[in-house]
Image (tube, rainbow, N blue to C red):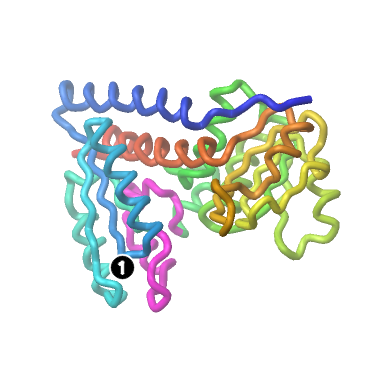
Amino acid sequence: MTAKILDGSATAKEIRAEIAEKVARLKSERGITPRLSVIRVGADPASVTYTKMKKKACDAAGMLSDLIELPEDSTQEQVKSVIAELNADPTVHGVLVQHPVPKHLDELDILATVAIEKDVDGISALSLGKLVLGTADYIACTPQGIVTLLDRYDIPIKGKEAVVVGRSIILGKPAALALLERHATVTICHSRTENLPDVVRRADILVAAIGKPEFIKGDWIKEGAVVVDAGYNRVEGMSHDVGDVDFEAAAERASWITPVPGGVGPMTIAMLLSQTVKGAEKYAR
């Protein structure tokens, strides 16, 4: 078996075209332009790249986007003060704090400051709690992108055994909850899971989010499984970035697989735009 490709780049392009149409309607019918404000503390190179990509995507969709750049040595209260101002601004529909923040800051406390109706990244404690309850307006963008990608390819989730390798609050845990909400039977694995290859071999749907290059081997994959590789690793000496799954070997056993790059990453940004537009539709005054 050679797996078919879950093309996140092509799917995200379609979704972003749909978003642009929604934005145009909001402007013409209600006089509302969806606006996303991103806060970046410091100048982490990866964060600088990601924030530029987000702004470019917003601009292409006809949305407004702001980047608030704060110094590396900003205090907890300074960051929270900026968030409070954005919370109070009725023209702002989404507020995102770029991850990671400098180590001297309490990231969970900062995220908790973002108003729930503007938490379009879906990773505050309140948003994650609402996801547990099944009442979340917004799901963390990468997990939401994963589920949306599966839906766009008509891949069934209900009743399937899903294995998520990774337990971060921005990916592993919300991905597991999103799949559970769609009636999958979900197992979460991590670095201390015993007999990890055997657990992975049970997966009808595998989400790899452990952050280790090509950690999951091809012979761990169940024949016909759907493999979603949410990893993105730069390895010295390699000519291209790789995911958390040994792609070539896994593709010989899987039915569907995401490439790296071009799989989950583009869907993440598309979901950020989509959820910001959703916020404008629902909460704009």
Asked whether, in this view, residue 111 is left or right of residue 188, the answer is left
For the C terminus, the image quarter is: top left
Is 119 contained in the magenta span? yes
106 or 212, which is in the foreground? 212
In the figure, residue 219 lies in which quadrant? top right
* Residue at x-position 23% and y-position 22%: 25
For the N terminus, the image quarter is: top right
Residue 198 to residue 168: above or below: above
Write down the region rendered in magenta.
99-124
Image spot of residue 252 (x, y percent)? 77, 32
Image spot of residue 135 (x, y percent)? 49, 42
Residue 104 to residue 228: above or below: below
Circle 1 SS class: loop
* Residue at x-position 69% and y-position 30%: 158
Image spot of residue 266 (x, y percent)? 45, 37
Mark 1, residue position: 42
246 or 71, which is in the foreground? 246
Asked whether, in this view, residue 46 is left or right of residue 164, the answer is left
Q: Residues within 10 Å of mark 1 (few under 14, many from 20)?
A: some
Residue 217 to residue 254: above or below: below
Magenta region, mostly helix, strand or loop? loop
Is 137 contained in the magenta span? no
Number of callouts in the render? Answer: 1
Image spot of residue 216 (x, y percent)? 73, 49
* Residue at x-position 54% and y-position 36%: 263
Q: Is residue 132 visible?
A: no
* Residue at x-position 64% and y-position 50%: 244
Residue 240 to residue 252: above or below: below
Q: Is residue 16 visible?
A: yes
Q: Amino acid at mark 1?
A: Gly
